[in-house]
Amino acid sequence: MRIAILNETFLPEGIGGIKRWYWELTRRFAKWGHQVHVYSLHWEGMPKIEMIEGIKIFRLSKIKDLYVGRGRRPFYSELNYAIKVFKHLLRKEEYDIIDCGPYIPAFSGSFVSMIKKIPVIFFLPDVIGLNWSTYLESRIWGMVGLLTERLTAKLHYNHIITITKLVKERLVNILKIPEEKIDVISCGVDIQTFDNIEVKKEKHSILYAGWLVPHKHVDWLIKAMPSVLKKVPDAHLDIIGDGPLRNELLAFVKRLKLSDNITFHGYLQNYKDVAYFMRKAEVFVNPSTREGQSHVLLEAMAARTPPIGIYKPDSGVTETIKHGINGLLTHPDELSDSIVKIFQDKDFSKMLAENGRKFAEERDWNKISEMVLNVYDSVARK
């Protein structure tokens, strides 16, 4: 099968769940003999065209930083990317299926699909709806985000893949997408990568991995540390990832006099390094309030590291963490208590870790990739 993937980010630039989704799928598709072309933004210093593990990557529209300000994508680069992808697909390539990430890529893919009669699939891992203004911390850009999301649902498409039942409900109820046009396929995890890392758990180590952007609320985790340290004086927090709030968070740590207790590692390009930290941590915390599912929670589970998430009814975290079974769901002002509980109750921690591991094993990327290919095949045959 000839497959085109349209998404702004792809290996090795940037971090995040959508990039991980497409990287894990495409490397398996290519290994299984499919032709895979990926169209992403062009980061400084990266080649325009590159082959990685059998995947041909076309990088279009130059970009320096994925976010500007406190967490908004640069509009010009996004628009330029959409136009260049549209022109490239229209002139040069033939595919059996086009798979578009949210949201700008969907416009390019949809128009090409209508002109060249190629089936197109949208990958929509979340519906932000009326929360765009909060998400982007701007009323004006929030309106732009809301309009873009609503217009995406009005585009031509053959099928949609999302990652949780909760998001499917929002696609149906908010964006009015027919239920029969949606498949729910969970994010996956590379079990073997975590099993190949040999490292002992580091006593009282806490880990966060992800973007440093407002809705991730890493400041809540930092704010919880003084209370954790009162009960567990040798606790240490490792923060993996980068983003527009990095300097602000570093200053916050310094202000709280926590520089000896919190380490910022930046973006780790080698995924095995991330797996290493996941394996050695005693607890993983994702304080985000806006998640389609949160693949990092699955990674923590694969590493047998009990995860903690923030309880919010409209967050996909609630479909990944089953409270008190494979992790803990808590409120921001109770983060420290949840961390300390996992540190101090070893039997409870072990139970969470083992149940989490079983949950992760059911979502190995090989199984997920086969499910996505089945959707491709079904859509391409219609």
Image (cartoon, rainbow, N blue to C red):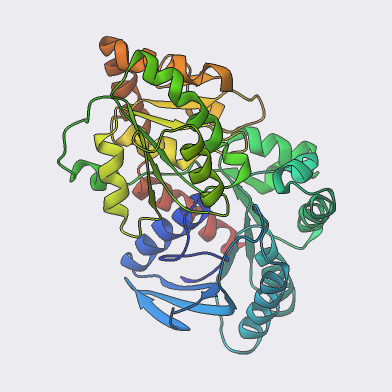
Q: Position of residue 243 (x, y in %)?
A: 53, 54
Question: Toward the viewer: 140 or 250?
Answer: 250
The part of the image, by quadrant, that contains residue 316 is top right
Coordinates of residue 188 in the picture (x, y in percent): 41, 44
Please tell me which residue is depicted at 47% across the width and 55% down the height of the picture: 15
The vertical placement of 37 against 146, above or below, is: below
Quadrant for the C terminus in the image:
bottom right
Q: Position of residue 265 (x, y in %)?
A: 36, 50
39 versus 379 height, above or below: below
**Residue drawn 46% across the image and 42% down it:** 295
Above or below residue 71? Residue 38 is below
Q: Which residue lies most toward the bottom here? A: 91
Residue closer to the observer: 305 or 137: 137
Q: Position of residue 285 (x, y in %)?
A: 44, 31
Image check: 107 left or right of 21? right
Q: How many marks?
A: 0
Residue at (47%, 44%) from the top-left corner? 187
Q: Is residue 339 visible?
A: no
Left or right relative to 164: residue 302:
left
Q: Quadrant of residue 205?
A: top left
Q: Is residue 170 visible?
A: yes
Foreground residue among 328 and 223: 223
Image vertical order of residue 33 relative to residue 87, above or below: above
Whether residue 335 sits left or right of residue 142 in the image: it is: left
